[in-house]
Amino acid sequence: MSTEPRTILIVGGVAAGMKTASRLRRLDSQARITVIERGRNLSYGACALPYVIAEEIAELDEVRRTPNGTLRDETFFARVKGVEVLTGCEAVAIDRERQQLRVRHLAEEREEERHYDQLVLATGSRPIIPPLPGVDLEGVQPLKRVEDAAAILDRLQPGARAVIVGGGLIGLEMAEALRARQLEVRLLEMQPQVLSGILDADLAEQVHRALRRNGVDLHLGEALQAIEGEDGRAVRVRTVAGSYPAELVILALGVTPNVELARESGLEIGISGAIAVNEHLQTSDPAIYAAGDCVESRHLINGHPLYLPLGSTANKHGRVVADSLCARTTYFPGILGSLLVKVFDLNVGRTGFSEQQAREAGFDPVSILAPSPDRVHSMPSARPILTRLTVDRASRRLLGAQIVGPGEVAKRIDVVATALSFGAGLNRFAQLDLGYAPPFSGAMDPLHQAANALRNKLDGLADSLSSLQLRQRLDAGEEILLLDVRSPDEYADVRIPGATLLPLGRLRSETAELPNDRLIVPFCKISLRGYEATRILLAAGFEKVAYLEGGILGWPFELERGQG
Amino acid sequence: MSTEPRTILIVGGVAAGMKTASRLRRLDSQARITVIERGRNLSYGACALPYVIAEEIAELDEVRRTPNGTLRDETFFARVKGVEVLTGCEAVAIDRERQQLRVRHLAEEREEERHYDQLVLATGSRPIIPPLPGVDLEGVQPLKRVEDAAAILDRLQPGARAVIVGGGLIGLEMAEALRARQLEVRLLEMQPQVLSGILDADLAEQVHRALRRNGVDLHLGEALQAIEGEDGRAVRVRTVAGSYPAELVILALGVTPNVELARESGLEIGISGAIAVNEHLQTSDPAIYAAGDCVESRHLINGHPLYLPLGSTANKHGRVVADSLCARTTYFPGILGSLLVKVFDLNVGRTGFSEQQAREAGFDPVSILAPSPDRVHSMPSARPILTRLTVDRASRRLLGAQIVGPGEVAKRIDVVATALSFGAGLNRFAQLDLGYAPPFSGAMDPLHQAANALRNKLDGLADSLSSLQLRQRLDAGEEILLLDVRSPDEYADVRIPGATLLPLGRLRSETAELPNDRLIVPFCKISLRGYEATRILLAAGFEKVAYLEGGILGWPFELERGQG
């Protein structure tokens, strides 16, 4: 063939950009592929940075190495991947008409025009820095780039005082990391809970407990006002409620997509503020694709646009863009908002919609909270998890899950994510032939337990209340009989204030003792016995019965302990 | 209502029987429900018994307790579940015309006739005992019932010699358990591999290595001929190849369904030898249902009957039967053959069809073997897993997976099982929005990696050979260049005999050195670099290139170690 090979420019050399370039070279050995990267570090795993801070990963360079130890630098990409990378270069303008990219060489302060046949924007995202006094002081750090991690590592002395601003994924991972390094850690969260928009309030309370148990001084509903410095270095943080010493301030308020280049060249920006693309990740200009953290996603459940950048999505994007550039018919289907985060000894995950998100999306959602051991309960390795499952009432279509606990959470999130991807209904979901062996799961998996509890609720076999619903009705002054159907020993150990003890084994013969004029709310440790009690009471003629979902394990409010 | 409550008899009180009874009582507070159980122990978790032997679970009774410590005995079922249980009672005959069950009270040696409106057979299964001399000696034990575990526990002295007959799930779990108790352990398997019919030969080799690494004396392709005794107690085991001292002989040859009662009363038995049922678990007699280990299953992929009893299936069955008995429209969809087993430090799982099973079922299967770390590779907790994924060539429908490794296997098996349940195609599967965070997974999950490798193969981007295919061609005398594209350090450490080293970083500039007259098989540790090398060689004009799937990690044959 005598045709000139095409030129493809890729702006951004971290996750999506380098993945696009590498795959593209494998698909097209002739194309001229050049990656333009503003920074010095390529193809690094930003998500692993908190684990470098925690010293779980011994060396910062590890996040830039391949599994066999090779540094992913310009030489690596040239020799192994056959891709040219220009670091320290910023793409400053796109002339879409002439298909030219203006590139500034930052060190030399010179600019050049480069022609492209196709252009890929993988410009990524940057941390949100609030417009508050002191955010530019030394010791005030977001965590996004390798350089950020290096700066934080430089300021770690045991006993140093850190304030983390923001209780999202990075904020929580950093709380664990800095505690591992023996810092004093305060976490400020403006909302009344951490992981707002990710976890419901009762499950977030489990995370609050884990943070406090591990020595994090948690300040909820407390907004940052200013960072105060001395000699240009941070020394204090001031909030609406107080003032705290801090030599290290981590700004973990989320990220915003880098869309300036796209916007200024007239490409369409989505309502989420990220670059709008079609399912082939093509922007409003057919010669320009976009991938990774700068791109707007669509939610798989209802197709609505949202901005939720993740390394996993960036990698998938890279493959789709490379395929699209080579006329291969792949597409990116969308995301479910699947998230995982480890917070000390707690594993946390969600996928799909919460009940509130489902309602906003026009569904009529019904949820259940079901606690279970994560494997056969007699195995000493068994740990509990709390599973909230949400479905659409009429169709019983699965809509989402939130799962929290010291037990195996990630597996169940992935199973729900997979089921959601194929539009699973609850009844079929409850019968999944999941793997079973005592070291891994119970004969009924926690997902089966939750699904069956939800089927029972939808089938009218047993009404139930979430802890928040019960709290509201108690606070409104409703007379409710809280019926603890556990054993006297369990009751003596820990109990919900005001609850009446009537062990399940006595319930069948003692129903006559119970009042018929008020709602009875049976519960136990995990509310399996609470459900059993509900069926017994309904059969005995009681009409107002609803068990407490999640039982003692899921109760986010005060508990009494020891002999009262 | 003045109608007489109906009578439901349930034969069998372990998993499916008690689950049916308990759910039935919750659905129908009036019915007379009686469970007939031949043994003394109810509702026990037989799958946990190896972990009692291993002393992971401290007490044998734990397998009969609820999570809150209550023993699930007759009193528990009467008081808590509202179900009558007759233990020590055998169901000996069904008079289907008169709807009568003849029940023998074993201790009193008396029989009675009991009327039923509906009958549930949950007669379970029993271990296969080969018709060989000595199987009835003391010290020769299957492991199925609580009594079996008690008998084994009685014979455990450190240093005692055990022979396990059969390399299936129970055999492998018992090998680990008995090694944990410091016994000398031999495992005899008639087939040339353990987990025959569950794992392909190359993956079974990983299990063989784990067994040997942990001190199990593994005898493959060696059938038991006799057990020799002294004073009625086992002392030796004789096989086709040798003779071994043994005070304890575990017979782990699988189970056979208890179908005598069903067969003698003329109920239809399926071709698998278990009781045939419809999707509501109704037998050929509409008044008789069957559940649990005595029931024939259908494979979800092609609807074919098979016998694969598991506690997880038994529990699902119980719910379906109870629902069916109460005119609730639930059904049991079938199984995927999902299995998990822990073998020392190795996790092993499979779901769906192997390539061979798929071919027998009329598909045109294509597979890939892809090794990956189970989470971000720089995390110190990362461990490898080997994933074999199988799809149908033309439709790309997912057909099955086998996964083995020290890393997280169960999660991936469950994801594949979920995808299989909804008829997932490979392309969609490769884009699942699975949860991602460094402690749990990589930005590309091992399943994404495997799916993408298989897409590349199907798309003609890179041909590949399994280790067994390569071995066959080498053994047939074909001249093949085995091209190791790892680093010199990696090569010095461990290598495939006869392989030529050419590090990937040099390949692009040195392709001219390679021969064009024979198949080139590039590989590395996990064959990601092997795939990259394949693309480079194809682009350089080489026509016969196919990388080695699984690389060094998946190579089941001889390896050279250290400086050669």
Image: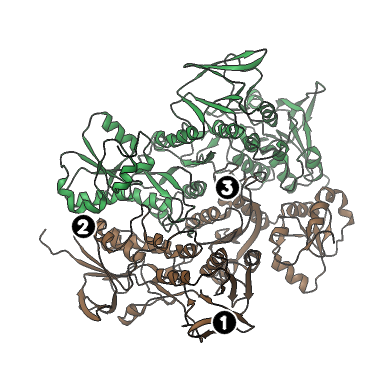
Chain colours: A green, B brown
First reached walking from the N terminus: tag 2 or tag 3: 2
User: In which quarter of the view is residue B357 placed?
Assistant: bottom right
- Which of the two marks, 2 or 3, is nearer to us in this view? 2
Looking at the rendered image, the quarter that the C terminus of chain A falls into is top left
Q: Secondary structure at mark 3?
A: loop
Q: Chain of mark 3?
A: B
Compute the Cα span from label 3 to label 1: 55 Å
Instruction: Find residue A264 and report its horizontal and vertical position in percent.
Output: 65, 23
User: In which quarter of the view is residue A33 placed?
Assistant: top right
Task: Give, as a three-letter code, the residue at label 2.
Answer: Ser
Residue identifier under label 3: B431
Which residue of the protein is positioned furthest toward the bottom in this rendering?
A: B133
Instruction: Find residue A469 and report its horizontal and vertical position in percent.
Output: 31, 35
Is B119 positioned to the left or the right of B231 in the image?
Answer: left
Q: Nearer the viewer, residue A212 or B484?
A: A212
Which numbered disc covers residue B29? 2
Task: Give, as a three-letter code, the residue at label 3.
Answer: Gln
Compute the Cα span from label 2 to label 3: 48 Å
Judge the density around disc 3: few (<14), some (14-19), many (≥20) Cα neighbours within 10 Å.
many
Residue A348 in sight: yes
First reached walking from the N terminus: tag 1 or tag 2: 2
Residue identifier under label 1: B236
Task: Give, as a three-letter code, the residue at label 1.
Answer: Arg
Give a yes or no on whether discs 3 and 1 share a subunit: yes
Q: Nearer the viewer, residue A42 or B516?
A: A42
